[in-house]
Structure formats: C-alpha cells, structure tokens
Image (cartoon, rainbow, N blue to C red):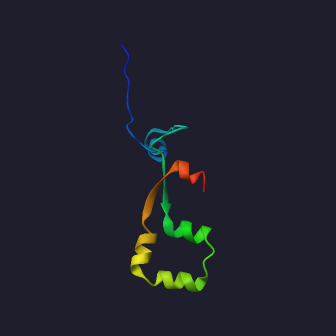
Amino acid sequence: MQVTHSYGDKSNEMLLQFYGFVEMDNANDIYMADMYEWTKQRHNVSEERWQFLESDPLVMQALHQVSPVPSTLVYTW
C-alpha cells in the first residue's frame, strides 16, 4: 500500500515556510512585489516627480499594493 500527500497549488515561498522545501520548476511560484519600491529602484525619476506622485493618495495606494508576479517574469526583468 502506498500513501501519497498533496501539498496543493502553493508557491515556493509557502512550501518553504510551511514544509521546508521548494520545487525547481513550480508552476505556482510567485514573487510578491511592492510596486512602489520596484518602480523607485528601477526607474530614473526626478525627486520633484516623486514628490508629485507621493502627494496623490490614489497613486500611492496603487503603488503600495503588493502584487503577485509570476516568478518566471522576475527572472527576466
């Protein structure tokens, strides 16, 4: 008799945190990206423009949402 266990559709972050392992080619793997930090680090935006963007609460709300990004895109950025 063989017993099998399914961990379900989980990202590598979840598998590592709760079960102590990751899968090399995990189709469910995602990277949680803070779009504000990602944008600020990768785009040459003047301080004046950042101050303008930061003065708009809707823009800041949108930029600070943490978004799941498929890990396959993270490696190509």
Q: Position of residue 14 (x, y in %)?
A: 44, 45
Q: Is residue 18 above or below residue 1?
A: below
In the image, farthest residue toward the right = 44
Q: Position of residue 61 (x, y in %)?
A: 40, 73
In the image, taking residue 69 as reference, residue 48 lies left or right, namely: right
Q: Is residue 50 above or below residue 77?
A: below
* Number of disc labels: 0
Q: Nearer the viewer, residue 43 or 24?
A: 43
Q: Is residue 31 above or below residue 23?
A: below
The N terminus lies in which quarter of the figure? top left
Q: Position of residue 11 (x, y in %)?
A: 45, 45
In the image, taking residue 9 as reference, residue 36 lies left or right, namely: right
Quadrant in the picture for residue 39: bottom right
The C terminus lies in which quarter of the figure? bottom right
Q: Nearer the viewer, residue 15 or 34?
A: 34
In the image, taking residue 66 as reference, residue 37 lies left or right, namely: right
Q: Is residue 46 above or below residue 26?
A: below
Picture residue at 44% right of the left edge, 62% below the top: 66
Picture residue at 37% right of the left edge, 37% below the top: 8
Q: Position of residue 42 (x, y in %)?
A: 61, 67
Picture residue at 48% right of the left edge, 45% below the top: 29
Picture residue at 50% right of the left edge, 85% below the top: 52
